[in-house]
Image: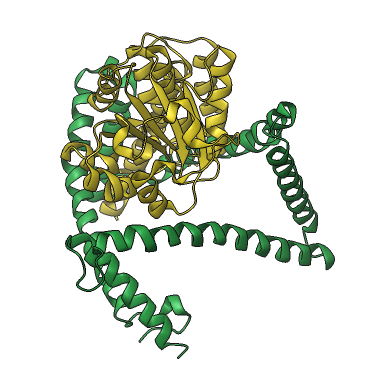
Amino acid sequence: MSLMERLQNVDSRIIYVLLLIALSLPLLRPIGIPLQTDPMVRAVYDIIEGLDPEKDRVLLSMDYSPGAGLDAEVSPVAVVEHLAERGIKWVAISFGTTDGPMMTNRIIADLEARGYEYGKDFANLGYMAGEENAVRLFALDCLSVPTDVRGNRTDQLPVMQGIKTIKDFAFVMQFSMGTPEMWIRQVVDPMGIKFATGTVTVSVPSIVPYFNSGQVKGVMGGVSSAAQYELLCNKPGRGAALMDAQSMGHLLIILFIVLGNIGYFMVKDKKDNLAAGQ
Amino acid sequence: MRKEVPLLITFVVALIVMLSQVTTGNIPGLGVAMPDLFERYISPWMTVVSAFSLCLASVNLIVVHSRNISRKQSEWIYSLILLGTLVIYGAWCTYIQINPDNTAAASNYSLIYNYILSPLMTGQWACLAFYVASASYRAFRARNLEATVLLASAILVMLGATPVGGVIWSKFPVIQRWLIDIPNMTGQRALLIGAAVGSFVACLRTMLGIERGHLGIGGS
């Protein structure tokens, strides 16, 4: 097998090992490549910066599971950190997956360890079955969930005082592994709420039409957006730490694609020349 | 009757849902508006049915895996682990609900999830990076014009989406943004509108009883 043919057929195991090295080294020794802020991420930051900590409350729909990895988990952590820093109260609920309440509990555990108070600063209303219908039902009557995950009555939680319908929340943000159509259909368009979404990177192109139409006010897509958000808040966290690794991983993949194509064209040229000579 | 009653229920419910989106006034004789009828009586039912389906799924899971274990079918040990986890989780959660003051039980409830299930699921997702790298290398070959356009777009989006792209050339993020905002959005909107029209037609067929797959009867 010639060198050019080899370039087209590199063993998968070699790619795996090189990718592992490309991802690991920046994690061990960060390079600190500067980040540019996406307007969709900046929009989420601006909305939260514009909220009034005295009266505004935020609803977070936590519809992701560990199955989507850090790509889904880092964005809500960054946004909640911003809310906590600004002293804005928030309530979490899950419609899309039964994992949502557990993922929220992780974020809450960290906040409680730092002195924030459950029930007063935030609450976790758990999972509500029914997906699209549940979203609509909750939007019309936020007290249709009788208790939170800790067994407290929802109507007695300090953070829920004055909340009757979803319009009583100043801002609603969904964190999911897909696209926010059910929220747009059931709540955003009929009730006119301020809504943004956080999702995995691969789903961002599907959400862009909703952002450009104004139905979704901001979009956070995966680790990259979380990193930008952390830097906007001047609190570099896990997202920022992962970005160098992502850059190196992408560069390696591009390198292999280019090498594969060079091999492909060289072999093709050789075959064409041989065919022309015969 | 086995066909007619479900078809009638489907028709009436679908009609209420459709009309609730386009009418506001009270229904003559009933004194209630169509949107209220939907939101007060039909929408909550969906939540009940969804909750019930979770129970049904659990029962089904127990039946299928108990059979696997009793017949010692291949890989029955996994069925045993699954049922064991289901029982432990169910019993533990019930205990917490009955004894809400036991904070140790509540905090330990998350242990299996946080330290076994979650790392396994995250690890599985992370493995995709390796498969995607290998698959991209093999699939992205400029064999024809369409493949070349796909290849060029993929490389430009990858470079624009990562910080290193902006360092190499400041225009990479601009090009990536244009690709996402214009060609991507045009295609996405066409898909969305096409899917919406298709869904409407499928709903209409179900409502009118032309499509009967959901009843287990088969098509028209």
Q: Is residue A65 visible?
A: no
Q: Position of residue B138 (x, y in %)?
A: 43, 44
Going 84% across and 66% down the picture, which residue do you hit?
B70
User: Which image quarter is the C terminus of chain A in?
Assistant: bottom left
Q: Is residue B155 left or right of residue B59?
A: left
Q: Position of residue B119 (x, y in %)?
A: 63, 33
Query: Chain in green?
Result: B
Q: Position of residue A202 (x, y in %)?
A: 37, 39
Q: Colour of chain A?
A: yellow
Q: Is residue A112 left or right of residue A121?
A: right
Taking depth in this image into account, of A35 and B135 the one nearest to the observer is A35
Q: Is residue A109 left or right of residue B90?
A: left
Quadrant hosting residue B55: bottom right
Looking at the image, what colour scheme do you see? Answer: by chain
Going 29% across and 46% down the picture, which residue do you hit?
A187
* Vertical position of residue A85 compared to residue B161: above or below: above
Going 44% across and 17% down the picture, which residue do you hit?
A81
Taking depth in this image into account, of A225 and B104 the one nearest to the observer is B104
* Vertical position of residue A42 compared to residue A260: above or below: above
Taking depth in this image into account, of B187 and A164 the one nearest to the observer is A164
Taking depth in this image into account, of B21 and A180 the one nearest to the observer is B21
Quadrant hosting residue A266: top left
Q: Is residue B70 left or right of residue A145?
A: right
Going 49% across and 36% down the picture, which residue do you hit?
A154
Q: Is residue A261 visible?
A: yes
Residue found at the very far bottom of the displayed protein: B1
Q: Position of residue B199 (x, y in %)?
A: 28, 65
Quadrant hosting residue A269: top left
How many numbered circles does the render carry?
Answer: 0
